[in-house]
Amino acid sequence: MIIRMMYVLPMILGRTYDVKKNTVGVDIFKMEDIKQPRVIEESFYNSNLKTVETSSDVKDILGINGELSLNIKAGTFTAGGFGSYVKSSMHSQNSVDILIKVSFRTISESLPYSVKPIAQWKTLGKAYLGTHYVQSIIYGGDLIACIRFKAMNSEDLNEIRGVIKTSISAGNVLDLVGEGKLESLDRQLKRKATMEVNYFATVPLEGVPNNIQGLRDLVRNFKDHVNKVNNGIGVPVEVELVELSNYDREFEYLKNKELETELENFEMCYDDLLSTKSRIQGVIFENLDTITKEEEKKLAGINDRVRKILNVFSETIANMDLEKGSTQLDPATEAYKEGKIGMAGKFRRELNKIVRKIGSKTEKQEHKFSSTYVHYGSRKCPEDKLTSLVYDGYVASSPRNHLGSGTNLLCLPRNPVDISNEPALTKNGSLLAGVKYGELLTRPFKFNNNKVVLNGAVCAVCLTHVQTVYTFMVSQHECPELGGWNMQYAGYAMTSENAVSENICVDTKLEAHQDSYIGPRDLSLKFSLANYLEKTVFCALCYFVLPKYEQVAVENGPSRRSIGSTYSKPLERCRRTKIRLSRK
C-alpha cells in the first residue's frame, strides 16, 4: 500500500522511512538510479477552508493523521510551516480560527520502474531500515492562512463562532477572500472580537502584509510565489512511500486499527493538558492586581499536576508503536484520570471555574468607575455587558434665529423631570427646541424620505462601566489601530443648516421620531460637506479603556472627555430654560 504524506528532511528518492517512529532511514538504491528519475508534470491547484473547532478539524484540512499530530505537538516530529500552526493552535485561547489551505503542485519525480534495491540492503538492519522507502517526491508549495478572531470576552465566543460559520458555510476560498466578504465579517464582529491574519508556508513569502488585502493577494497569486523557487518547480512538499515488504515479506507493516481509534480521545486529553499549561501563566499575569493567595495556590496546584502528567504523555508518545495495541497508552491515560473517571477537558473546566471567580471580582472592581457618551441617530446603545442605556430621547438645541441661546446640541429624555411647580418664566428666558433632519439634498446613500427628512433626530445617553476616553474622528470610517482604540459606532458628520452649531457624529442608521411637533423655528441637521469636494464627511466615535492605574474618579460632575463622569439629568441644571418639544 502506498502512503502519501508531507515531505520531511532529509528525504530523497530511494531513502527509507520508519512510519512507526517518524524517522528517516538509509539509502537502499544506487545513486546512478536516483539521478535519472521519472519526471511527470502535475499542474495541480487546490484550495479549501474550514472553521476550526477541534483537533480533528486541523488534521482534516492539513491531511495528517492522529499519530503524526501528536508527535508534532510533542516536538518529536518537525513539519515546517504546518507544524508551526499545529503548535500555535494549542496556545490560542478564546478564539475561533478560519483555516485556508492552498496547494499548488508542479512536478513529481519517481524512481524508474526497473530499479531495484542494492543486494545487501537487508543487512543494514531493521532498526535503520524502517518500514517504507521513498518512491516519489512531489514539488510545489503549500500555504496555510489562519484568520483568527479573538474574543474580547469569553462569554461571546459561541456567538462569534456562530456568526463565522454562518458567513462561510456556503462559500469557497475565493468567495471568502473576494472583495468585501472578510471586511463585512470583521465589521460584524468588531465590538466582540479582534481579527488577525497569519501565514504558514513551505515557500518564502516576500512582502505580504498580514491584513485582509495581503491575504487576498496571496491566495490569488500563490502560484507566483512558488514559481520564484528552484527554477519554477517550488520545493518538495509531499512524498509517496512504498512498503519494504514489496521486496521482502519480513518487513511487512500492519497498522493497529484499535490503537488508531483510541488515539482520538488520547489526543483530546493531551490537548487539554497543553492548553491548560499555556493558559495558566496568562491568567496569573492578566490578574496580578486581583488574584488572591488562595487562588494563586490553586493555579500553582493545577500547573504542578499538569506538568507531571505531561511528562508521562511525552514518554508514551515518544515510545509509541503503531503496530501494537492501545494498552501502550494506559500509563498516560491512568495518569490523566488521577484515580478518578477523567473525561477529556477536565483541567480546562477546572481552570475555567477559577478564572470565572477572578473575573467576577475584576468586573465588580471595574464597575466602580463609569463613563457616559451620547449616541446620536440611534435609540439604543451597543449590546454588550459593559454598556447600558441611561435613557433615550430627542436631540434639542436653540431655536432658529433666537438670540442668546447656546450652540451645543443636547440629548433630552422623552420624559423630562416635572417642573410644573417651578415659577413661570415669561421674559429673559433662553429657549430649547427640537432638532430635525433637514431636506438632506446632498446624501451619501438613498433612503426613505418619509422616515428621515424633516423628522426629529433621536439620541441615547449610554453608560459604560469602565473609565473610557471618547473622541470624534472626522473623515474616518474606522478608528486608529495603534493605541488600543476601538469603534463605538460609525456615522456621518452633521451640523445645523440654518444656525451656528457644533458638528456631531450621527449614526449611519439615521433614526428619527414623529413623537412631537417639529416647527419652522427648529434647527435642521444636514450632512457636513467637504467644501472643496462637495462630498459627505464620514465620522467615527472612537474610544479606548483607560488602564487601571490611570483610572481616576471625577466627583465634580460630567467631564467633557467622560473620564470617570457621572450622569446628571440635564433639566436639573437648566431650571431657567423653556422647553418646547411636545406641543401637539
Image (tube, rainbow, N blue to C red):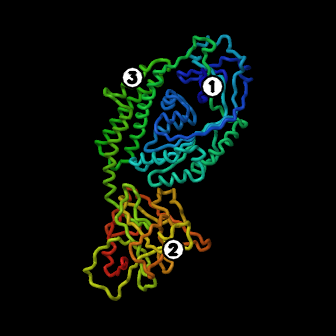
- The structure residue drawn at horizontal position 70% and vertical position 22%, both measured from the top left corner, is 111
What secondary structure is marked by label 2? strand
Three-letter amino acid code at disc 2? Lys
Residue 486 in the image: state x and y as whole percent.
47, 58
Label 1: which secondary element: strand
Pointer 1 residue: 240
The residues tagged by marks 3 and 2 sit, at their Cα atoms, a distance apart of: 74 Å
| Residue 481 percent location from the top left of the image | 51, 56
Identify which residue, 229 or 573, lies in the foreground. Answer: 573
Provide the residue designation for mark 2: 526
Residue 386 is left or right of residue 475, and the answer is left
Q: Residues within 10 Å of mark 1 (few under 14, many from 20)?
A: many
Residue 200 appears in the picture as rendered: no
Q: Amino acid at mark 1?
A: Glu
Residue 471 sits above or below residue 576 on the image: above
Name the residue that disc number 3 marks.
331
- How dense is the environment of label 3, judged by Cα within 10 Å: few (below 14), some, or many (20 and up)? some
Secondary structure beneath dot 3 equals: helix
Q: State which tag comes first along the sequence, 1 or 3.
A: 1
- Report whether 288 appears left or right of 24: left
